[in-house]
Image (cartoon, grey):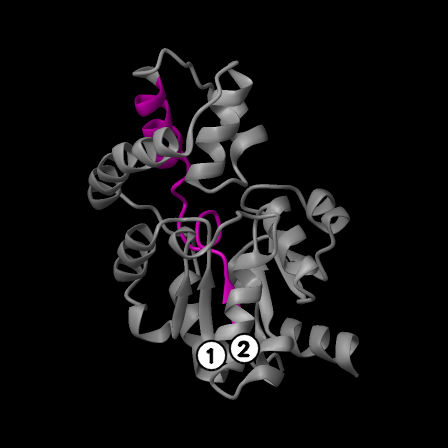
Amino acid sequence: MFPATFFDFNGVLVNDEVVHFETFREVLAGLGVALSEHDYLHRYLGFDDAGAFRAILEDAGQKPSAEQIAGLIEAKRPLYMARARQNLPTFAGAAELIKRRAAAGPALIVSGALRDEIELGLEVLGVRSSILHIVAADDTQACKPDPEGYLLGIQWLAERGQEAAARRGLVIEDSLAGVEAAKAAGLPCVGVTHTYSQDELSKAGCDAVVDSLVGIDDALLTALFRRLYG
């Protein structure tokens, strides 16, 4: 069985993409930039806040500075937190899966979300004590599909004497960029069709694809581990 687990956050554990879209749209409106839900879901979903703001503004013909991007992130932060505190939908089976995987070995979050957003989501799920470490957007220089976040997670475990577990840690992702990042880090990945189809996730490189987190049971994981590692 996989000795460690790396969970993505947005789109895997919490169903908050609408919250992100609404807050992106509100902040960008102040710059005269319109953002459609279709463009957000199909072009910008895999980015962290910095990457999304930069890509959206560049697509709108602007050349944002690092300082402007940082200011936009800080403008969005309280808007997201206020909405999320009122209503933060979570996916069926999320809390149970985290607890089950944490009982089997170290469980980490590797996400393009900000740390306070992740902390809030874990609080809502009631699983903060089950997560050993968080790699958030605050900790990385590059967002997925760059593998930096997963490599930092591997490094964190290796520094604590768990390199073998880290190298065979299972990633659970929903986005194509996330799957690409996991595979670039050399990690096995299960995709969940919360955001993309089974065909899209399989083509991106997932080792297995499920329709919901409930489908990531011990039978699936045992069979997948044996297939990958013998």
Rendered image quadrant of residue 28: top left
Residue found at the far top of this picture? 32
Q: Residue at x 40, y 30 (%)?
A: 21
Rendered image quadrant of residue 31: top left
Q: Quadrant of the N terminus?
A: bottom right
- Mark 2 / mark 1, whichever is N-terminal: 2
Tell which of 215 and 66 is nearer to you: 66
Query: Label 2, label 1: how many angstroms apart (C-alpha)?
Result: 5 Å
**Residue underneath mark 2:** 4
Is the residue under label 1 in contact with that under label 2 (CB below 8 Å)? yes
In the figure, 198 relative to 6: above or below? Answer: above
Region of the chain picked out in magenta, as a range? 4-28
Tell which of 87 and 148 is nearer to you: 148
Residue 72, percent across and down? 33, 31
Within 10 Å of the Cα at label 2, are there few (<14), some (14-19), or many (20+) other Cα atoms? many
In the figure, 37 relative to 221: above or below? Answer: above
Residue 41, percent across and down? 53, 31
Q: Residue at x 66, y 67 (%)?
A: 187
Residue 215 appears anywhere in the view: no
Q: Secondary structure at mark 1?
A: loop
In the figure, 7 relative to 75: above or below? Answer: below
Q: Is residue 95 left or right of residue 61?
A: left
Residue 125 appears anywhere in the view: yes
Rendered image quadrant of residue 67: top left
Within 10 Å of the Cα at label 1, are there few (<14), some (14-19), or many (20+) other Cα atoms? many
- Report the disc number at residue 106: 1
Q: Is residue 142 left or right of residue 128?
A: right
Residue 217, percent across and down? 57, 71
User: Which amino acid type corresponds to the residue marked 2 in the rendered image?
Assistant: Ala
